[in-house]
Image (cartoon, rainbow, N blue to C red):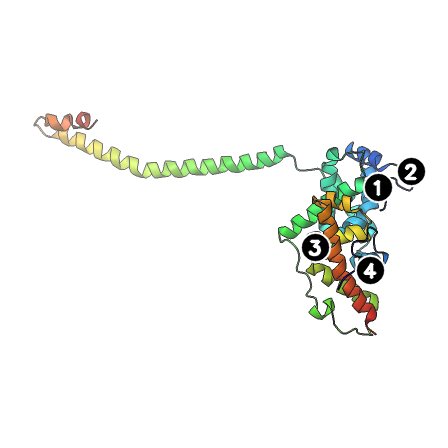
Amino acid sequence: MKDPHAFDHRPDPVLGEALRSALAPTRDGAAFVARVVAASQRPPIAMVDVLARWSRLGIAAALLAALAAGYAVGLHAPADALSADSDASAMMATPQSPDASLLLASYSER
Amino acid sequence: MIVLTRTGDGVDEAQLAARARAGDRSAFGALVERYADQARRVARAVLSNEEDADDAAQDAFLTALVKLDKFDPSRPFGPWLMRVVANAATDRRRRRKVRQVEELDPGLVAGGPRPDTVTEQEMLGERLRAALAELPDRRRMAVVLFDVEGYSHAEIAEILSIPEGTARSEVFHARRRLRVLLADWRATP
């Protein structure tokens, strides 16, 4: 259907009124204005506060990671130290002199 | 075209905007009061749900307050604000944070029976909202901005960031659809 008025450069009062009525807010206009003005008066969240919140989280996460890493290292470190001690005491206990190749093994590995 | 540059008490909108920018909340309140209905209607054209539309309109006013330094006081305030409203409503719709819109009877869009018991105006409103919901966002906003709010094609082009010819075309297509609906409504005995 061709509509001869579709390209009118003027608003259509009939359609406009029908749409205006269809889209009219049913809620109180004054309450809306008060709500917006009240929201505008709330202090905005400063970027510094946001960063501070994030930094607190970051520090906590870093502490947790450090603790976890320390715990993981601690699980292995005593075992190595124990075996090194026992090797040394075993060598001291025997009257024979230790094999030079054993003593120099660490140097040769490097 | 409605010229919205002066308030009833003669205070220029550019002055109000400047005062609002300087922290005068009463000036901001005056601007909100002046444009509240318009912003809510435009947002509702996009979002259908009234609560979402009000939330979007509020977001738009608060965004506008923050961005007032970008408003050119030599130009009318309305199109600038409506651009912020259109963006806020479109963003909200895109983010899909809209509340569930009540299902509309498909028969309401066109060709449905015309119950005598229901208020005619309410039924027509429902049909128009349903018909608007079928249109693309840009088209809905274009026809509402043109036929309801009285903005020119050039202003609509600026608000929607589209060429003027496209704005004209959007209004044309939306009008064609809505006028058929209105004609059917009036023709139904």
Q: Earlier in the sequence, mark 1 or mark 2?
A: 2
SS at badge 3: helix
Indicate left or right for A109 with B38 as reference.
left
Report the Cα–Cα distance between label 1 and label 4: 27 Å
Specify the quadrant of the image occupied by residue B122.
Answer: bottom right
SS at badge 4: helix
Q: In x, y percent, where is residue A81?
A: 25, 33
Assess whether mark 4 and mark 1 are in contact (beta carbons under 8 angstroms).
Answer: no
Indicate left or right for A95 with B4 as reference.
left
Residue B141 visible in the shown view:
no
Residue B182 visible in the shown view:
yes
Q: Which mark is residue A18?
A: 4
Assess whether mark 2 and mark 3 are in contact (beta carbons under 8 angstroms).
Answer: no
Assess whether mark 3 and mark 1 are in contact (beta carbons under 8 angstroms).
Answer: no
Assess whether mark 2 and mark 1 are in contact (beta carbons under 8 angstroms).
Answer: no
Specify the quadrant of the image occupied by residue A79.
Answer: top left
